Image (spheres, rainbow, N blue to C red):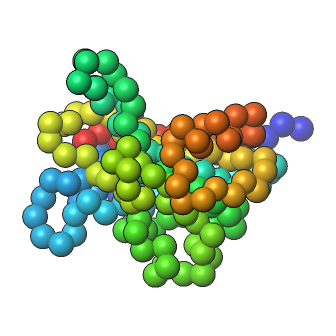
Amino acid sequence: MASNIQFKLISPAIDHSQESGKLPRYCTQEGLGTKWDISPPLEWHNVPPKTKSLALLVQDIDAVDPMGRVVPLAHWVVVNIPVTVKDLPQGFSGKEDEVGAEYGAVEEGVNDWKVRVWRGPKFPNYDNRFQFRLFALDQDMHFDNQVTKEKLFDAIAGHVVGEAVFTATF
Protein backbone atom coordinates (compact mmCIF):
# COMPACT_ATOMS: atom_id res chain seq x y z
CA MET A 1 0.00 0.00 0.00
CA ALA A 2 1.55 3.32 -1.09
CA SER A 3 1.81 6.09 1.44
CA ASN A 4 0.41 9.47 0.48
CA ILE A 5 2.08 11.27 3.36
CA GLN A 6 4.21 14.03 1.90
CA PHE A 7 7.86 14.57 2.80
CA LYS A 8 7.82 18.18 3.95
CA LEU A 9 10.38 20.88 4.77
CA ILE A 10 9.30 24.06 6.57
CA SER A 11 10.71 26.97 8.51
CA PRO A 12 8.70 28.14 11.53
CA ALA A 13 10.08 31.65 10.78
CA ILE A 14 8.50 31.79 7.29
CA ASP A 15 4.80 32.10 6.45
CA HIS A 16 4.04 28.96 4.43
CA SER A 17 0.41 29.90 3.76
CA GLN A 18 1.58 31.83 0.69
CA GLU A 19 3.29 30.32 -2.34
CA SER A 20 6.52 32.01 -1.31
CA GLY A 21 6.78 33.44 2.21
CA LYS A 22 9.25 36.17 3.14
CA LEU A 23 12.71 35.30 4.47
CA PRO A 24 13.05 36.94 7.92
CA ARG A 25 15.22 40.06 7.92
CA TYR A 26 17.54 38.57 10.54
CA CYS A 27 18.41 35.81 8.01
CA THR A 28 19.71 38.40 5.55
CA GLN A 29 22.73 40.67 5.40
CA GLU A 30 20.42 43.68 5.67
CA GLY A 31 19.86 45.08 9.14
CA LEU A 32 21.50 46.39 12.26
CA GLY A 33 22.65 44.80 15.47
CA THR A 34 24.10 41.45 16.36
CA LYS A 35 21.17 39.30 15.22
CA TRP A 36 21.58 39.28 11.44
CA ASP A 37 22.67 36.93 8.67
CA ILE A 38 21.89 33.85 10.74
CA SER A 39 20.47 30.65 9.32
CA PRO A 40 16.70 30.25 9.63
CA PRO A 41 15.19 27.44 11.70
CA LEU A 42 14.23 24.44 9.57
CA GLU A 43 12.27 21.30 10.35
CA TRP A 44 11.14 18.34 8.28
CA HIS A 45 8.43 15.74 8.53
CA ASN A 46 7.55 12.38 6.98
CA VAL A 47 11.06 11.41 5.87
CA PRO A 48 10.76 8.56 3.32
CA PRO A 49 11.24 5.11 4.93
CA LYS A 50 14.34 4.11 2.89
CA THR A 51 16.25 7.26 3.86
CA LYS A 52 19.74 6.71 5.30
CA SER A 53 20.92 10.37 5.36
CA LEU A 54 19.84 13.88 4.37
CA ALA A 55 21.42 16.83 2.58
CA LEU A 56 20.24 20.44 2.27
CA LEU A 57 20.87 23.02 -0.43
CA VAL A 58 19.62 26.61 -0.32
CA GLN A 59 19.95 28.62 -3.54
CA ASP A 60 18.93 32.02 -4.88
CA ILE A 61 17.22 30.71 -8.01
CA ASP A 62 16.87 34.21 -9.52
CA ALA A 63 20.56 35.20 -9.25
CA VAL A 64 21.97 36.73 -12.42
CA ASP A 65 25.62 36.50 -13.46
CA PRO A 66 27.55 39.45 -15.02
CA MET A 67 26.50 38.24 -18.49
CA GLY A 68 22.81 38.57 -17.56
CA ARG A 69 22.15 34.81 -17.32
CA VAL A 70 20.15 33.29 -14.47
CA VAL A 71 22.58 31.09 -12.53
CA PRO A 72 21.38 29.69 -9.17
CA LEU A 73 23.66 30.86 -6.37
CA ALA A 74 24.28 28.50 -3.43
CA HIS A 75 23.78 30.28 -0.09
CA TRP A 76 24.03 27.17 2.11
CA VAL A 77 25.11 23.56 1.69
CA VAL A 78 24.54 21.16 4.61
CA VAL A 79 25.43 17.46 4.43
CA ASN A 80 25.77 14.34 6.60
CA ILE A 81 22.44 15.00 8.31
CA PRO A 82 21.49 11.78 10.16
CA VAL A 83 17.89 10.56 9.84
CA THR A 84 17.59 10.88 13.63
CA VAL A 85 17.88 14.68 13.29
CA LYS A 86 14.50 16.33 12.63
CA ASP A 87 15.50 19.99 12.42
CA LEU A 88 18.26 22.58 12.20
CA PRO A 89 17.74 25.25 14.86
CA GLN A 90 17.83 28.96 14.12
CA GLY A 91 21.42 30.16 14.02
CA PHE A 92 22.76 26.62 13.48
CA SER A 93 25.22 27.75 10.81
CA GLY A 94 28.73 28.15 12.14
CA LYS A 95 27.72 26.78 15.54
CA GLU A 96 27.39 23.03 14.94
CA ASP A 97 29.52 22.28 17.98
CA GLU A 98 27.28 24.35 20.27
CA VAL A 99 23.85 22.93 19.42
CA GLY A 100 24.05 19.40 20.81
CA ALA A 101 25.53 15.96 20.28
CA GLU A 102 22.79 14.85 17.87
CA TYR A 103 24.18 17.34 15.33
CA GLY A 104 27.78 16.11 15.64
CA ALA A 105 27.95 14.47 12.20
CA VAL A 106 26.34 17.39 10.35
CA GLU A 107 28.75 19.37 8.16
CA GLU A 108 28.38 22.66 6.34
CA GLY A 109 29.73 22.57 2.81
CA VAL A 110 31.18 25.37 0.73
CA ASN A 111 28.71 27.91 -0.68
CA ASP A 112 29.28 30.10 -3.74
CA TRP A 113 31.24 32.64 -1.63
CA LYS A 114 33.73 29.82 -0.87
CA VAL A 115 32.83 29.77 2.84
CA ARG A 116 31.25 27.07 4.99
CA VAL A 117 28.39 29.02 6.56
CA TRP A 118 24.93 30.37 5.76
CA ARG A 119 25.21 33.49 3.62
CA GLY A 120 21.98 35.47 3.59
CA PRO A 121 20.92 37.71 0.73
CA LYS A 122 21.54 41.43 0.47
CA PHE A 123 20.71 44.35 -1.79
CA PRO A 124 20.22 44.36 -4.82
CA ASN A 125 18.57 40.90 -4.67
CA TYR A 126 15.20 42.09 -3.33
CA ASP A 127 12.29 39.92 -4.47
CA ASN A 128 14.62 37.07 -5.47
CA ARG A 129 13.40 33.56 -4.67
CA PHE A 130 15.37 31.34 -2.31
CA GLN A 131 14.77 27.64 -2.78
CA PHE A 132 15.33 25.33 0.19
CA ARG A 133 15.81 21.70 -0.97
CA LEU A 134 16.16 18.79 1.43
CA PHE A 135 17.25 15.54 -0.21
CA ALA A 136 16.46 12.15 1.35
CA LEU A 137 19.24 9.78 0.32
CA ASP A 138 19.21 5.97 0.17
CA GLN A 139 22.82 5.72 1.36
CA ASP A 140 24.57 6.95 4.44
CA MET A 141 26.71 9.29 2.38
CA HIS A 142 29.64 10.99 4.06
CA PHE A 143 30.94 14.23 2.61
CA ASP A 144 33.83 16.28 3.87
CA ASN A 145 33.26 19.92 4.75
CA GLN A 146 34.63 21.00 1.35
CA VAL A 147 31.59 19.70 -0.55
CA THR A 148 30.09 22.21 -3.01
CA LYS A 149 26.67 22.14 -4.66
CA GLU A 150 28.28 20.62 -7.78
CA LYS A 151 29.97 17.84 -5.78
CA LEU A 152 26.70 17.27 -3.90
CA PHE A 153 24.67 16.91 -7.12
CA ASP A 154 27.27 14.54 -8.61
CA ALA A 155 27.34 12.33 -5.50
CA ILE A 156 23.58 12.09 -4.91
CA ALA A 157 22.61 11.32 -8.53
CA GLY A 158 20.65 8.07 -8.41
CA HIS A 159 20.42 8.09 -4.59
CA VAL A 160 17.54 10.52 -3.96
CA VAL A 161 14.48 8.72 -2.53
CA GLY A 162 12.63 11.92 -1.72
CA GLU A 163 12.92 15.68 -1.94
CA ALA A 164 11.17 18.33 0.15
CA VAL A 165 11.21 21.88 -1.21
CA PHE A 166 9.93 25.30 -0.27
CA THR A 167 10.65 28.77 -1.58
CA ALA A 168 10.99 32.05 0.29
CA THR A 169 11.51 35.55 -1.08
CA PHE A 170 13.97 38.19 0.06
Where is residue 15? Give x, y as percent: 35, 48
Tell which residue pokes out farthest to the top in this image.
68
- Would residue 160 be found to the left or right of residue 35 on screen? right
Q: Is residue 59 left or right of residue 157?
A: left
Image quarter hosting the C terminus: top left
**In this picture, is 91 found above or below 166?**
below
Q: Is residue 13 above or below residue 129?
A: below
Quarter of the image holding residue 69? top left
x and y percentages locating residue 154 in the rendered image:
64, 36
Asked whether, in this view, residue 169 is left or right of residue 162, the answer is left
**How many badges with numbers are in the image?**
0
Expressed as whole percent of the image width and height from the top left, the position of residue 14 reads 35, 51
For residue 105, say whether it is visible. yes
Q: What is the quadrant of residue 70 in the picture?
A: top left
The residue lying furthest to the right in this view is: 1
Q: Nearer the viewer, residue 51 or 104?
A: 104
Q: Is residue 162 among what the camera can see?
A: no
What residue is at 64 percent from the left and 56 percent from the top? 143
Residue at (15, 36) in percent of width and height: 124
Q: Residue at x 75, y 34 (%)?
A: 158
Q: Along the line of sight, which residue is nearer the eye, 47 or 121? A: 121
Q: Position of residue 150 (x, y in %)?
A: 54, 37
Quadrant into which the N terminus falls: top right
Q: Where 126 sits versus 85, above or below?
A: above
Up-down: is 52 above or below 106? above
Q: Residue at x 38, y 50 (%)?
A: 114
3 on left or right of 45 = right
Residue furthest toward the left? 32
